[in-house]
Image (cartoon, helix red, strand yellow):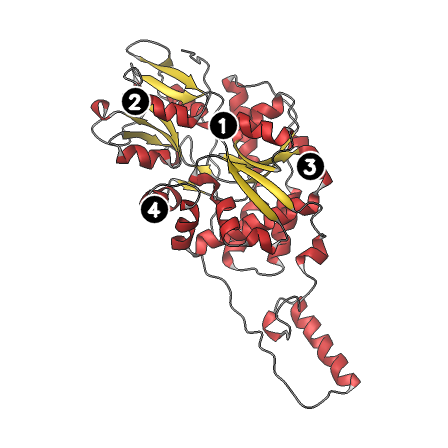
Amino acid sequence: MNNKIKFVSAIAALSLLTGCGAFNSSSNEKTESTEVPTFNEAEEKASEEKDCCKDGDKDCCNEPADCCGDSATEVLGKPEKTDINIGYLNSTAHLLAFVAQEEGYFKDEGLKVTLTQFSSAAELVNGLESDKLDVAFIGSVPTLTFQSQGHDVSIFGGAMTNGHGYVIKSEYADKDELGVEILKGRNVASVKNSVQDAELQILLKNAHIEIGEGADKVNIVYFDSQKDAYAALLNSTIDAASVYSPYASLAKSQGYKVVYYCAHEKALENQPCCRQVAKTSALSSNPNTYTALERAFIKAYHFTQSDHDKTIKDVKKYIDIDEEFIDTEVYGGYSVSSPDPDKQGTLTLKDTIIELGYTNDYDIEPYYNTDIYKNALESILSENSDDIYKSLKEHFDDYE
């Protein structure tokens, strides 16, 4: 049993704006005329259409596709690579990839994407470095740790905020969210080098509870993956375990009680969790490809805010649990799945895990690429600037 004994003050809270609304609608019907316009009339009409399109009024355009400017491919450039492999974990947190695949957004961007589930962050990083993966959805804490150790991986987008917590056997708690005090004297399964572990240590520090063996302490037992930590609850020596989406809902359905949801803890609210990660060199070599990917993720976010029912069905194809659980995890207020890189929030987390002793300090700037997301979002806003997309722009401007 490997115990951590170093603590840290609470993570500063950062707000994550989310938008709501529906897709904008416009009419692009063409009207036929038997009259052939003169050269001057045609030139004047073209000039008027160009001006109105420049002002963002697409209703005045005649052509339905790219009447108001060049297509995204023409503006941003064709993807350098079109066959893309994305790695994810067994979590609803990675729904942006699921929705982008099922709703055809990758295809719309000229990409052919294969999604593969992995068991741990270490496997995902290995997949990136061996060029078996082009993108991986990885927890922020392991990503930062791997970067500090010299791995050539960069964050270029977000995936989920919050979504973690701990659960405990029902004999130790008669209701949910009693707090970390009920973990005293218990053996708690967690995942080494994870957001879940960092968050627990923060809350224990705030509650003046030591880590270790003893009636007034919390004994943390580390496992290699969240799946293994959760499975350890079947062992009589393990009393509680860390969870991320959707394990909390699964645990409740199996009779366990929730110790806390991080979204409900002031010290942990708006915690940047999973990030979009790629090889640093790949982002530099294939900017058009990653911008196209990011456009698909942004469109997927819009869809999740617009069509809850279909989003749940899309997620279920990859995370095979009851739709009720998916609904709770995605729309129950415990997490937000956003493509925003949330750089400021991640930098705050970096400072925290350095104090925790997870890693040594390092220069993160070469490993944090926000240009990909910025360019993708700006290109989409030039096509459709509804409230959902605008909310992403507002948040990015505040926390880039």
As shown in the figure, which amino acid type bears the numbered disc 2? Leu
Q: CA distance from mark 1 to mark 2?
A: 20 Å
Precedes in sequence: disc 2 or disc 4: 2
On residue 323, the disc is 4
- Residue under pointer 2: 234
Mark 1 lies on a secondary structure that is loop
Residue at left offset 42%, top offset 56%: 307
Looking at the rendered image, the quarter that the C terminus falls into is top right
- Residue under pointer 1: 120
Mark 4 lies on a secondary structure that is helix
Relative to 43, say whether 351 is above or below.
above
- Can I make out residue 349 in this image? no
Precedes in sequence: disc 4 or disc 1: 1
Precedes in sequence: disc 3 or disc 1: 1
- Can I make out residue 95 in this image? yes
89 with respect to 86 (left or right): left
- Residue under pointer 3: 282
